Image (spheres, rainbow, N blue to C red):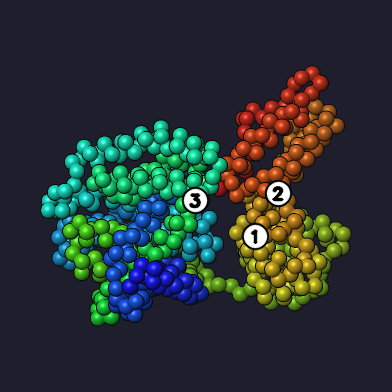
């Protein structure tokens, strides 16, 4: 079969399988694996040389690690250091130890058992983050800690790729360069990256050619990967180091944008090749063994994750979710197992069995998370799911979603003007509390289309979005804009970041919840310092106009963190100029940085 025909088969299988599995709520990684299994020698046999394809598409993993390196800004890692190195380190070490002991007890040699344990200790970053995002749980406690553990696992792959060749038998290691060559290559990449890469990119950028910058990006990745391979280390280590060295550069975002398409395609095809190489006969002829190993792997990881979650201060519900989401094997297990076979650290049948175990565990994870939510949460968290209220439409002109401190003020003002409103609140405890004071309020999730229709959204004129939770607020705004476009939405924004996302959804009127109160307090402080009431009012109104104009300017570039910071610094200088008095005095922000608290919420 020609290279062109093989490429057509690979791409066609992925295009068909991935959307099909995603329709059933499964991750795209499983779609790529399923596509590979379908066209591989064990099924349709459309491609008969998966090893060659696997060798080519491994470059997708190299590109992935380059992007991980780009994201690894020292400042960001320092902020997350306790969760990343504490929780992540504990999870990898404990899970590796338990699984290695289990492998040794089942008859594997000590080194093989250790390699298998560390490969299976890793979870799937792409798989877990996608599930958390789909369930709107990325910002939850178990979501944040899960991300920290996944980040540590991604970092742990780098030293593992460097150490595994050192464990290889002498016959395989004879051709490797001496250790001093490897150390020298790492030092050369680090020093060269610090002093050469940025200068190179600066010269390429001056040429003002996008194509040339893309070529330079690929050159950096391929050259550093080649240098590491020539020194007896892994390709991925060089790409990762190059990414880390460029993480704080002004070209980080453009580098990531250039690499992303190549990474996505090659990484997807890598998983297709892994599926092609999978021994489907194992699952067909020894299904109980494969299923038993997969369930055992998930049980060990879930217990370890639950234990370290409780020790880290997570409550029982968050620790259970923490364990359920990260209980599967990950994509880097395929990389490590393939490398271990090449280095003669694992025999091929054992590696194939472990790879199939990882695949099955990934397929079972959505079922585990769903079963936990449906069966365990109502029993272990002390209450069954409460039915939403049945709502009879009242024909009110106003619909309010969220009846916390913000929504209550709006409702009281409307009531004062004898304008009735239908109120929805998703927190049943808040509903019960407010009802004790004689308020009419309905228990329901305003993001659900059926409840909005029952509440009269089709006949209302105004929708007040006062939900406290950011993700729930955005979900509700999206539903209202899609199904009730006639409703004018007045939304509460927690911060600038929330404001921008609401605007992206088409919400035209969004009010930052603390902005007006903060300005009122600032005016009172100015008067307390001796400024007249007129002067204080003029200062706060000037600041309001300036900040609202800045908000619109930053909305245009809010997807670019570098541009956001630049506009903030420029706005600070402009604001100083606005407050120059006739005596030449300036009202200067003593920190020199505008809106630091809100900047932290930009992500």
Residue at 39%, 71% (x, y): give it: 5
Q: Which mark is residue 258?
A: 3
Name the residue furthest left: 171
Residue 404 position by quadrant: bottom right
Q: Quick one: label 3 or label 2, which is nearer the N terminus?
A: 3
> Does dot 2 land on a helix, a strand or a loop?
strand
Residue at 64%, 73% (x, y): give it: 388
Judged left or right of residue 492, residue 158 is left
Whole-percent x, y for residue 509 in the image: 75, 55
Disc 1 to disc 2, C-alpha distance: 13 Å
Q: Label 2 near label 3: C-beta < 8 Å?
A: no
Disc 3 to disc 2, C-alpha distance: 35 Å
Whole-percent x, y for residue 218 in the image: 42, 49
Residue matched to label 2: 512
Q: Is residue 313 above or below residue 208?
A: below
Residue 124 position by quadrant: bottom left
Task: From the viewer's side, name the closer residue of 197 and 347.
Answer: 197
Residue matched to label 1: 473
Let me know if residue 134 appears in the view: yes
Residue at 62%, 37% (x, y): give it: 566
From the image, state whether disc 3 or disc 2 is nearer to you.
3
From the image, state whether disc 1 or disc 3 is nearer to you.
3
Let me know if residue 81 appears in the view: no
Disc 1 to disc 3, C-alpha distance: 33 Å
Task: From the viewer's side, name the closer residue of 212 and 584.
Answer: 212
């Amino acid at each position: 079969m020609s290279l062109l025909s093989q490429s057509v088969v690979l791409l066609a299988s992925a295009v068909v399988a991935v959307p099909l599995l995603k329709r059933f709520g499964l991750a795209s990684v499983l779609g790529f694996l399923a596509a590979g299994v379908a066209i591989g020698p064990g099924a349709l046999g459309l491609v008969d040389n998966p090893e060659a394809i696997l060798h080519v598409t491994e470059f997708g993993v190299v590109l992935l690690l380059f992007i991980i390196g780009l994201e690894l800004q020292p400042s960001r890692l320092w902020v997350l250091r306790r969760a990343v190195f504490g929780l992540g380190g504990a999870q990898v070490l404990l899970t590796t130890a338990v699984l290695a002991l289990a492998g040794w007890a089942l008859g594997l040699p000590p080194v093989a058992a250790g390699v298998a344990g560390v490969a299976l200790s890793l979870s799937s970053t792409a798989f877990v983050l996608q599930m958390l995002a789909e369930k709107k749980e990325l910002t939850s406690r178990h979501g944040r800690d899960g991300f920290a553990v996944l980040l540590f696992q991604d970092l742990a792959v780098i030293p593992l790729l460097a150490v595994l060749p050192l464990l290889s038998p002498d016959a395989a290691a004879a051709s490797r360069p001496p250790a001093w060559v490897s150390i020298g290559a790492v030092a050369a990449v680090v020093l060269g990256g610090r002093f050469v890469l940025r200068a190179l990119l600066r010269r390429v950028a001056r040429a003002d050619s996008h194509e040339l910058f893309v070529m330079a990006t690929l050159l950096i990745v391929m050259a550093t990967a080649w240098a590491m391979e020539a020194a007896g280390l892994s390709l991925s280590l060089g790409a990762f180091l190059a990414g880390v060295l460029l993480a704080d550069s002004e070209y980080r975002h453009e580098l990531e944008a250039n690499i992303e398409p190549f990474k996505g395609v090659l990484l997807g095809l890598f998983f297709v090749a892994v599926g092609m190489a999978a021994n489907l006969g194992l699952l067909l002829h020894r299904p109980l063994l494969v299923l038993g190993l997969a369930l055992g792997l998930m049980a060990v990881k879930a217990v370890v994750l639950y234990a370290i979650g409780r020790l880290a201060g997570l409550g029982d519900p968050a620790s259970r979710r923490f364990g359920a989401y990260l209980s599967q094997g990950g994509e880097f297990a395929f990389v490590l197992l393939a490398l271990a076979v090449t280095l003669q650290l694992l025999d091929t049948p054992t590696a194939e069995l472990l790879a199939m175990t990882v695949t099955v565990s990934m397929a079972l994870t959505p079922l585990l998370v769903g079963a936990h939510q449906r069966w365990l949460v109502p029993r272990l968290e002390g209450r069954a799911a409460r039915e939403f209220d049945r709502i009879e439409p009242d024909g009110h002109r106003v619909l309010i979603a969220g009846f916390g401190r913000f929504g209550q003020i709006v409702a009281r003002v409307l009531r004062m003007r004898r304008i009735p409103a239908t109120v929805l609140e998703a927190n049943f405890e808040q509903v019960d509390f407010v009802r004790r004071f004689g308020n009419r309020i309905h228990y329901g999730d305003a993001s659900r289309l059926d409840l909005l229709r029952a509440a009269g959204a089709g006949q209302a004129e105004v929708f007040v979005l006062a939900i406290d939770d950011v993700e729930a607020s955005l979900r509700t705004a999206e539903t209202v804009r899609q199904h009730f476009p006639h409703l004018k939405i007045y939304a509460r924004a927690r911060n600038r970041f929330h404001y921008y996302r609401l605007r992206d959804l088409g919400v035209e009127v969004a009010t930052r919840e603390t902005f007006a109160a903060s300005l009122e307090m600032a005016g009172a402080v100015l008067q307390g310092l001796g400024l007249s009431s007129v002067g204080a009012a003029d200062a706060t109104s000037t600041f309001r106009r300036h900040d609202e104009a800045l908000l619109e300017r930053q909305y245009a570039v809010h997807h670019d963190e570098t541009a956001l910071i630049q506009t903030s610094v420029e706005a600070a200088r402009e604001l100083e100029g606005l407050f120059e008095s006739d005596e030449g005095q300036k009202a200067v922000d003593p920190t020199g940085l505008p809106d630091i608290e809100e900047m932290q919420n930009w992500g």
